Amino acid sequence: MSTPGMQYATDLTDGQWQRIEPLLPAPRWRPGGPGRPPRDRRQIVNGLLYLNKTGCPWALLPGCFGPWKTVYDSFRRWSLQGVWSPVLDQLTQRERRLNGRAGMPSAGLVDSQTIKTATQGTTTGYDAGKKIKGRKRHLLVDTSGLLRQVVVTAADVDDREGLKQVLTRLKAAGVARLRKLWVDGGYQGEAIRTWVANQKKTHKIDLEVVAKPSGGFTVVKRRWVVERTLAWLMNFRRHARDYEVLTRHSEALIQIAMIHLLLKRIK
């Protein structure tokens, strides 16, 4: 059922906005101060959710969200400030606790997805295994498929190098409970196993490779969880390809997609 005033299915309900509003940067403008009053932050977020879901170009955002350049500028500024990662973290921890689990996971799964690019943006490469020129998304999710970290690189970056970047960011974010990671065959090797095991001073992270059985289609134990997360992501048309010039913006829009999924669970 639509909330009064909603124009699109992607618009936030009052309850969803109340949950996310305190997590966003407060407006810097003060009444009587210099400059123009800021745009309604709720409409800016609604514009980002609409763009992410429909895949429309920035310049074709409906006017109800305000000037598209204003929406883009807020997105660019918030992405540069690293706003989306803590917002996603707060909503993810809330969802886990509602399901009777600790806020921080002790186990997770890592996988990558190579995707074509649709711009002349920087940081692109050729994935010889997938025969795709573009970028690669490296995702770490918990055992229920909720996103914990994402790194976007050129497509020719090895999965093991991508894993190093993911865990380095995770460590910088202060996630300390991780003990176990399930991965596919692209992460094999004693060198990466040793590197991962030595990332914590107080404990080691166990890297377990879950091999895919030979033969026809098989649902692989553990790995299906992260593959489902990638399928969730592809339901947002903006992510059918990588349309962003900067990988930082690609990562931010992936986080926004997962934020949207979590907000939809709030009535």
Image (cartoon, rainbow, N blue to C red):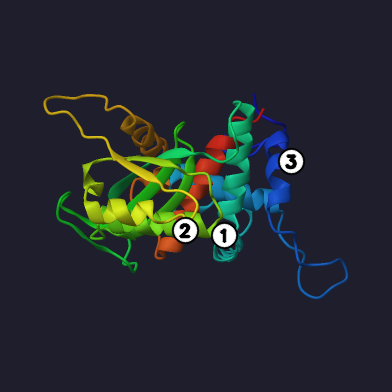
Q: Do tag 1 and tag 3 residues touch (Cβ < 8 Å)?
A: no
Q: Earlier in the sequence, mark 2 or mark 3?
A: 3
Displayed quadrant of residue 242:
bottom left
Query: At numbered mark 2, what does the secondary structure look like: helix, strand or loop?
Result: helix
Q: Which numbered marker is on residue 128?
A: none
Residue pointed to by mark 1: 75
Query: At numbered mark 1, what does the secondary structure look like: helix, strand or loop?
Result: helix
Residue pointed to by mark 2: 169
Q: Position of residue 166 (x, y in %)?
A: 41, 55
Q: Position of residue 100 (x, y in %)?
A: 61, 26
Q: Position of residue 75 (x, y in %)?
A: 57, 59
- Residue at 30 percent across and 59 percent down: it is 161
Q: 11 left or right of 211?
A: right
Residue pointed to by mark 3: 18
Displayed quadrant of residue 35:
bottom right
- Residue at 48 percent across and 52 percent down: it is 253
Q: What's the residue type where badge 2 is placed?
A: Arg
Please determine whether, in this image, residue 57 is positioned above or below residue 14: below
Q: 213 left or right of 27?
A: left
Please determine whether, in this image, residue 208 is positioned above or below residue 81: above
Label 1 to label 2: alpha-carbon separation? 21 Å
Label 1 Cα crowd, 10 Å radius (few <14 / some 14-19 / many 20+) = many
